Image (tube, rainbow, N blue to C red):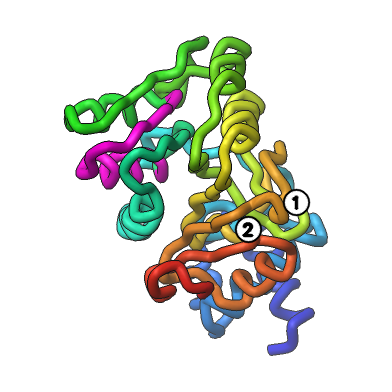
Amino acid sequence: MWVAERHRRILDLLQTHQGLTTDRLAQALGVSKETVRRDLIELARLGQLARVHGGAVPSGVPPEPAYRDRTGLQQVQKREIARLAAALVEPGQACFLDAGSTTLALAEALAARDGVIVITNSLDAARVLSRNAGLEVRLLGGRLETDVPATCGEQTVAEIGRLAVDWAMVSPVGVDAASGAMDYLWSEATVARAMLSRARQRVVLADSSKLGQASRIQICAVADVDVLVTDGQADAGLLAVLKAAGVKRVLTPSSAAGVLA
């Protein structure tokens, strides 16, 4: 099947079903999931559809799934990412964690460590980390969010601005070579951006379904990402595009001891 015909069929299927997973599209078209992902990336670039976790919907930026729903998605991938990201932080170092389902998985991994300082706006992450008395945990003040149990707003950003840390680890909605790391909500993007600005090393945590996906608000350009941590299902072509756009280092389960994947 020619590329143009695949693109037309994808758009027709999306209009009929109002959203399909990558697996369903691959089955319908009789091609690999990797081929479908590349098609979706190109169609999204042209504004003809919107990529979402694990698939696509008709054009228009979709709302991000509810936080409690996200915590049940991509759990294996998030644990892979958490293990890799936690290994970056050495005893005596301080790190920011923003609020999200992937950074919650990272909090679980960091909770097994001692001698690390973790500063977060996530109530769930702070609760998990507080189980270990060998960690120093700081919860940022501010206005409470309604969906994500986290603080946000001017007070949160002001507190971040008074600190300087070794690592900032944030988990955006998507990471796209042209648009950068992006979030759906202004409040979340503002906190993540502030954290990145006050860290020596800026780390973006993104499972493979987020790569090549854009959203509404930029957190940072890809050239500002020091380390991108993703899972073993990440498409090699997408990672190459992100590296070419300026990501300095990529960590996957197959990249031994922090060597570029």
Q: Quadrant of residue 185?
A: top right
Q: Nearer the viewer, residue 36 or 153?
A: 153
Check if residue 120 falls in the magenta segment: yes
**In the shown orientation, is residue 175 left or right of residue 70?**
right
Residue at 63% of width from left, 62% of height from top? 248
Q: Is residue 209 above or below residue 214?
A: below
Residue at x 45% of width, y 18% of height: 140
Q: How far from the left and from the top, in percent, is residue 68?
A: 37, 34
Q: Going from the N terminus, do you reach mark 1 or mark 2 first?
A: 2
In the image, what residue type sits under mark 1? Ser
Q: Residue at x 46, y 12 (%)?
A: 141
Which image quarter: residue 133? Answer: top left
Q: Choose mark 1 or mark 2, whichever is in front.
A: 1
The reply to whether callout 1 and callout 2 are in contact (CB within 8 Å) is: no
Residue 117 falls left or right of residue 48: left
Q: Is residue 12 above or below residue 152?
A: below
As measured in the structure, the alpha-carbon distance from the residue carrying label 1 to the one carrying label 2 is 29 Å
Q: Which mark is residue 16?
A: 2
Visible in this render: residue 185?
Answer: no
The amino acid beneath tag 2 is Thr
Secondary element at tag 1: loop
Depth check: give the residue in front, 171 or 84: 84
Between 10 and 39, the one lying in front of the other is: 39
Q: In this picture, which residue range is highlighted in magenta?
A: 102-121
Q: Mark 1 highlights which residue?
A: 179
